[in-house]
Amino acid sequence: MNMVTVIAAISKNNALGKDNDLIWHLPADLKRFKKVTTGNFILMGRNTFESIGKPLPNRTTVIITRNKNYFKEGCLIANSIEEAIALAKDQEQVFIIGGAQIYKETIEKGLADQLDITKVHETFNADVFFPEIDTQYWKEVAREDCKADEKNKYDYSFVKYQKII
């Protein structure tokens, strides 16, 4: 049985991105994302994969698409979130890395066990948003607050939520 973790960086207004790209650049978040996901399966929608452009090193990439003929060298393809999770059934840890539609569906269907969220303490203009984190279903279990510095333009927090069963 695997632990399914939704991992995302969101702003104060739940912004995820704009024009199929990230809005902010936080090297500390990217470094942490790499450390946490390396060696694991990462599941993502086709648009998210295409915005990244290639499989990320030292991770197994699973692309979720409704297109039954979609193929990308070096990636696994699934036609639903459930199918993507099933492909990773032997993995201890599985990460859902986006995009907005995949996050929403994973959370609404109750498929995620935890949320690993980088909260950027700023409001941004965006065209895709993370679903509201409902504290009736999610309990904050860890938080690390970080201040902006010469490399990271915004204050941010790494926040982990566990699903309330």
Image (spheres, helix red, strand yellow):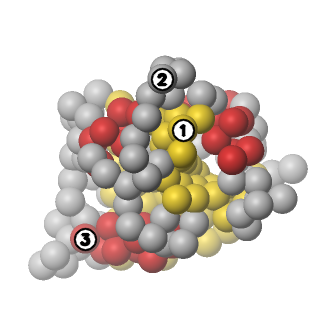
Give the residue drawn at x 31%, y 39%: 50
**Residue at the disc numbered 1:** 77
Cβ atoms under marks 1 and 2 closer than 8 Å: no
Q: Report whether 102 appears left or right of 24.
A: right
Amino acid at the residue labelled 3 = Pro
- The residue positioned 54% from the left and 45% from the top of the image is 76
**Helix, strand or loop at disc 1?**
strand
- From the viewer's perspective, is residue 142 above or below residue 117? below
Please state the horizontal and vertical placement of residue 70, each as a whole percent of the image.
44, 28
| Residue located 76% across and 61% down the image | 90
Please rate how many residues cluster around mark 3, counting C-alpha atoms within 10 Å: few if below 14, some from 14 to 19, many from 20.
few
Q: In front: mark 1 or mark 2? A: 2
Mark in front: 2 vs 3 = 2
On the question of residue 106 being in view, the answer is: no
x and y percent of residue 44 in the render?
A: 48, 43
Say whether disc 3 or disc 1 marks the residue closer to the N-terminus: 3
Distance CA(mark 3)–CA(mark 1): 29 Å
Instruction: Say which residue label 2 marks.
Output: 69
**Secondary-structure class at tag 2:** loop
Residue 27's tag is 3
Q: Residue at x 80, y 52 (%)?
A: 164
Q: Residues within 10 Å of mark 1 (few under 14, many from 20)?
A: many
Q: Is 31 rendered above or below residue 48? A: below
